Amino acid sequence: MIPEIRKKYNAEFSEETYEAFLRELNSSEKYPTDFRSCETPLFLSQDVTQKLITASSEIVSRVFSNEYREQSRNAIPKKLYVPNESEHPTFLQIDFAVAHNENKEFIPQLIELQGFPSLYCFQVLLDNVTRHHFYVPQNFETYFNGYTSASYIQFLREIIVGNSSPENVILLEIEPEKQKTRIDFACTESMLGIPPVCITNIIKRGKKLFYKKNEKEIPVERIYNRVIFDELHRKNLPVNFHFTDELDVEWIGHPNWFFRISKYSLPFIKSNFAPPAFFLNELAAYPEDLHNYVLKPLYSFAGTGVEIDVTADVLNAISEQQNFILQKKIDYAPLVETPDGFAKAEVRMMFVWKEKPLLVNNLVRMSKGKMMGVNFNKNKTWVGSGLAYHPKM
């Protein structure tokens, strides 16, 4: 995107440096990375950075409007409604593909969004280790709104831990030691002092929850929730409490926002930065150019159930069409020059609510396949998870 920076980075890159980068990344915490880390960060120009910020602001204004609050009431499955919903989500992720417009200029195009946490703490480690091994211009940063790594971690501590003791705050997950994102859980424990706890290890007494530490029951005051309902349903593990129970805890963030701000939101977002999307059951007729659309199930995560080769037969075979959307495909721009061709990229703009949605950090995924994700990038290099650096603003 910035030719002189890309040329310098690629000229200085070596496999030996990349291996050293991976060794440090995989040995700094209790767990290694269980996903592929890209050989390069993304360097954003001032113009594209500002477009990403503008696009994010448009999406934020839509999903936090009173109109959308009413529209999204039906997003939550009745059997999964969690009491004591907060007025707003604590976390918001907005994923943009970097595409071309008709003038071959780079523009962001909305892929998905979620009112749920992302790898907030791992991205700090990734930034530090990247700077240790690779070339990053001094006036480039990954944070937004004036944050540095130290002030960003302190901000996360204020939001997640609050006024509680860290031992009374837990990161709740399903078998956290087996999750691909477990390195983020380890970073969260190192940086914020809160332990990852499996949902099966929670004890319920009345409305209060506890977990055991050194054979002692520790009361839970705040839950940094990382549990995905889809996975919880699929695994059907034995648990001592249910999300739908009346509980004397504070959710950071509240589980209902996982549904309210999600793929369900896409048909309601009208913007030049958002491709058209439709609820499948509301279409009077299928688009004639179905090959230009992607089919997405509403209630799934990490790309499961997405169909990129859409036909009328595929759509007609779906019995619960109300649980699916059609979204216009995006033609990703060939963005990052690599030793074996160009990679395309998605940029996740990461928000935390403090009086209002505050943009704080980013995450990047690079791909050379039909889609992002491991299954579409096997045996490929210069792909995977990363971050974007942008000029200080």
Image: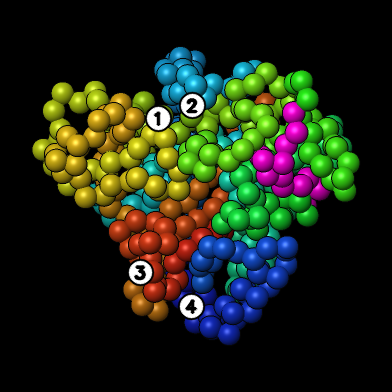
| Magenta-highlighted residues | 191-204
Q: Residue at x 48, y 29 (%)?
A: 259
Label 4 and label 1: CA atoms lie apart by: 40 Å
The amino acid type, in three-letter code, at marker 2 is: Arg
Residue identified by numbered label 3? 342
The secondary structure type at the circle numbered 4 is helix
- Observer-nearest residue: 245 or 311? 245
The residue type indicated by label 4 comes to: Asn
Residue 261 position within the rendered picture, expressed as x and y whole percent measured from the top left: 48, 30
What mark, if any, has residue 264 been given in the picture?
Answer: 1
212 in magenta: no
What is the CA distance from the residue labelled 3 to the residue labelled 4?
Answer: 13 Å
Q: Nearer the viewer, residue 135 or 72?
A: 72
Specify which label sits upstream in the sequence, 4 or 1: 4
> Which colour style is shown?
rainbow
Residue holding disc 4: 10
Q: Quadrant of residue 82?
A: top right
Q: Nearer the viewer, mark 3 or mark 2?
A: 2
Q: CA distance from mark 4 to mark 2?
A: 42 Å
Considering only vertical position in the picture, is 300 above or below 143?
above
Label 3 or label 4, whichever comes before in sequence order: 4
Q: CA distance from mark 3 to mark 2?
A: 36 Å
Q: Tell which circle, 3 or 1, labels the residue nearer the N-terminal end.
A: 1
Q: Nearer the viewer, mark 3 or mark 4?
A: 3
Residue, x 54% and y 53% (percent of image)? Answer: 363
